[in-house]
Every structure is written in C-alpha cells, then in structure tokens.
Amino acid sequence: MRLLTAVTVIFFFIACSRPGNDAKRTLARDLAGTVSSFDEFGHPSPEGPGGISVNISNDTVDQTTQTDGTGAYRFRGLDSGRYIITVAKNGYGTFKRFGISVNTHPDSVDIPQQLTPLSITRLSTTVVTQFSAHGAPGGAIIFNLSITPVPTTNQTPRYYRVFLGKDSMVSSSHYDWLLPAFPIDRSPLGQWVKMSFLDTIPAGSRLWMRIYGDSYLNNMYTDRLLPEPVFPCLNPNAPPAVSFMMQ
C-alpha cells in the first residue's frame, strides 16, 4: 500500500509539472531580420551589410548581436512584449525602431518571428560652410549657401536640410518648421522656397534658419522620448543660425 501511494504521488507530481514546463516554453520566441547599409548618396555600401550592431531592449531585456555577411541577425528566446531595436555602426547614423511586438503562440513558438527589413546610412560628409537668408514677397524665402566638398560635373548631388524656428536656438532638435532635403549640385547655390506653411506666418515676423548637410536616405525616425523627430545622418558641423524678416 505504501509503495502504491509513493508511485501515485510521483506520477501526480510529474503530471502536474508538465503543463508548467510547456507553458514556460511557449513564453519565448526568436526574432529574426535583416539590415541593409547605404552610403550617403543612397547606394549600397561597398563594405556590405555585415558587422552591424543590432540591439533589442525593454525594461527587462538588453541583448546585442551583429549581422552576418548577408545582413541577417537573430535574437533567441524573447518573452512576449514590446521592444526597441537599435541599429548602429561606426560612421553611420544610428537608427531606432520603437514598439516592436514579439508574439508567442503554442503553434508558432518554434518559428522565428520575422521583422521587416531595417537599414542604416552613412553620416553626411557635406558641410554647409556659410549661408544667408531673407524673406521674399508672397511669403517666400530666398537663401544662398556654400558647401564643401563642392560637387563636380556629373557627380551625384549632395543634400542639405533646412530648419526654421522662432528663436536663435533653432537646430535639428529644436525647430518650428522643417523643409524637405534639397539636392545641391554646385556651390554656391541660390534657393527660392515657397511652401504652404509659410502663408501662415505674418509679414514682419522674424524667423531663424539653420542648415545642415544631410544624406540622401536620411533614416528619420520618431523617438517617443524626444519632442522632435531624429535625423541621424546630419552632419553636425553646421554654421550658426541666421535671422530674417518675412515679407
């Protein structure tokens, strides 16, 4: 009778423990994806997509891996939840993607969840050396700028990005209005700009402008912890802001 009781207790313990093990196993899942790398003109990087650092994190997880020669990476054993992916490499603009959701299910726990492709772009080497600006009739802006290196004939255009603000502290992280990236194929260059939001700015208003060199694929992203979108490929060597009056 004692032997039967002991066997029964052991069987009961094993039977009760199995569901717990299975449940624990379904909590984890691999996440896989690829990263592409580009130069500042939008062409695939000559060194290829290998050796790119990819980090995944949330309140409890912080893992880093590197892409292989094809740009592929894989994180193993992630719990269900939401994560932040950070992609970085020396000489490139760091890119982040927020709200990555890892989902687990008993039928798919052994199948890696595929993340949509990511990319990083080389930091811009375009330096805006000087610029000036003034308002034009009809709510337009005219500005002139010089850059280095100077593009040569038949060379791929370089790019620059304009930020406008109501105070002298305007920058890529503190601005009121943003202009799209413009190509520049010669230096110096004069630019006339008329956009719909300029019609809302009263004549006589003083604005401040700052211009940065940018990459063709700027990899802009929104950081939920920051007030403004992030442009990771801007060249930080930008001249001070200048002011002008709207007409």
Image (cartoon, helix red, strand yellow):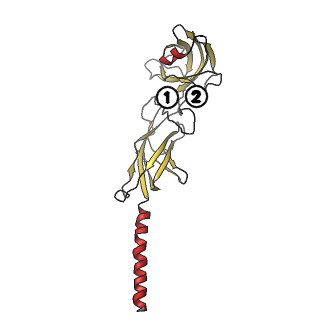
For disc 2, the marked residue is 172
Residue 126 visible in this rendered orientation of the protein: no
In depth, the one of 159 and 100 nearer the eye is 100
Q: Mark 1 — residue? A: 215
Residue shown at 38%/53% (left/top)?
112
Q: Position of residue 121 (x, y in %)?
A: 48, 35
Q: Which mark is residue 140?
A: none
Relative to 244, is 28 on the left or the right? Answer: left
How far apart are labels 1 and 2 at the CA level? 14 Å
Q: Secondary structure at mark 2?
A: loop
Please tell me which residue is depicted at 50% across the width and 40% down the height of the picture.
96
Instruction: Give the residue at the far left of this rendering.
Output: 107
As rendered, which of 183 and 170 lies closer to the eye?
170
Residue 39 visible in rendering: yes
Residue at image position (45%, 54%) is 80
Relative to residue 48, is residue 207 depicted above or below? above
The percent position of residue 36, horizontal first and vertical second, equals: 43, 39
- Looking at the image, residue 169 sits to the left or right of residue 136; the answer is right
Question: Disc 1 marks which amino acid?
Answer: Ser
- Quadrant of the rendered structure where residue 10 is? bottom left
